[in-house]
Amino acid sequence: MSKTISAGRTPTIRIDSINGDLSLVGWEGDDILLKADDDDLIVSQDGDQVQISCDDLSMRVPKSASVFIQKINGDTSIRGVTGMIELTEISGDLSMRDVNHVTIETVHADFNLRGAKGSLSIRKADSDVSIRDVDGSVTLDSVSDDLALRDVRGSIHANVGEDVVMYINPQPGNTYKVNAGDDILLVMPPRSNATLTLSADDIDVEWDGVENEEDATSRVIVLGDGSAQITLSAGGDIRVSNRSDAGESAEDFGNFAGMGMDWSGFGERISRRVEQATERAQRKIEAANRRIEQKVRDAERRGRGKAALEIGRWNWNFSSKGVPVPPKQPVSDEERLAILKMLQEKKITSEEAEKLLSALEGGS
């Protein structure tokens, strides 16, 4: 069912509860367009005040609308809304893009924000958080898992349970205070002006003119005029760098490749290398299989009842049981990838994959 509501260019929309998913897009029109199941949709209106509840909901609203959401049980996507946005509880993933000021009480799954003209405040995030391109400040009272930040132009205050990766250009007068349960990677431009107060198990600073201090667990470092204040505390290690390719080490800092962050092409390079390694391993296995099949045919023609063949690390004993001899070396990552790829493409069954891996590792 589709429903159109006229409530002006700056309506206030209150969503009491959505049992399923919500998709909300700001547009240039003056009307609110709703798409939902007619049996579940409940709408009330008082002038520019609109109240909604239903199961799954897709809606378009005037860009300047203000949105207040109480409870979403599924995933939520919000894009292109420049009015105030306040969310109380989101049970699924939350994705936001091209918004303004955002306040969130609790998001239980992954949170991704790209593009905010105002500030962002989250009281509690129970999973990974990815934030990019924010003009205002970012305040994260509690992030349970990993945090990725890039191009935040306001101040930052965050408490994070695990790893943090930060790409920032520190601004004079701003404060950046981050506490992490594990590691922190901070990347800044070479001419940054900041005072760094660092505390960690190990501190590694890749910066011209700054000497590393062996075994130091706390340091104060002044870069340029020191006009921005950066305070980092990590339960693990802190690494500070001005290298643009520092994000290539993001695999050491949680699941950022899966969080939609563009660490200078890091995710694409890793995916491409995995794909290339898989293809190489597949070609090697196919060539080895062809050689094995040829040698088996040669042995059969010579009338031998059984044959023992050794081709590279592939040492096969073609006895009546047909059980491979344990290999001479541990199974390689390329061979594992090839087996998984064949399983994914349904060239072999899961049982066959387990037997092949067991055989390669010297199992029975």
Image (tube, rainbow, N blue to C red):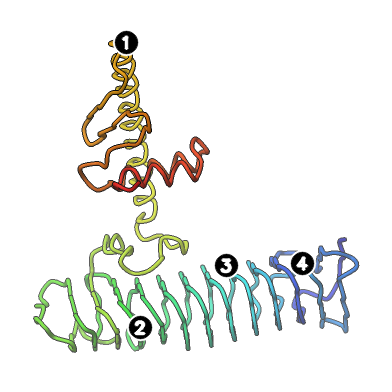
Q: Earlier in the sequence, mark 2 or mark 3?
A: 3
Name the residue beneath numbered marker 4. 56
3 vs 1, front mark: 1
> What's the residue at 43%, 47% (across, down)?
354
Q: Which of marks 2 and 1 is nearer the N terminus?
A: 2
Name the residue beneath numbered marker 2. 180
Q: Distance between the residues labelled 2 and 1?
A: 67 Å
Q: Earlier in the sequence, mark 1 or mark 4?
A: 4
> Badge 2: few (under 14), some or many (20 or more) residues near its Cα, within 10 Å?
many
2 vs 3, front mark: 2
Q: Distance between the residues labelled 4 and 2?
A: 36 Å
Q: Which amino acid does label 3 sit on?
A: Arg
Q: Distance between the residues labelled 2 and 3?
A: 26 Å
Q: In this view, does 48 lie above or below 324?
A: below
Disc number at residue 301? 1
Q: Which of marks 3 and 1 is nearer the N terminus?
A: 3
Q: Which of marks 4 and 2 is nearer the N terminus?
A: 4
Q: Which amino acid does label 4 sit on?
A: Asp
Q: Distance between the residues labelled 3 and 1?
A: 68 Å
> What's the residue at 58%, 79% (across, down)?
107
Disc number at residue 97? 3
Q: Where is residue 239, by image quadrant?
A: bottom left
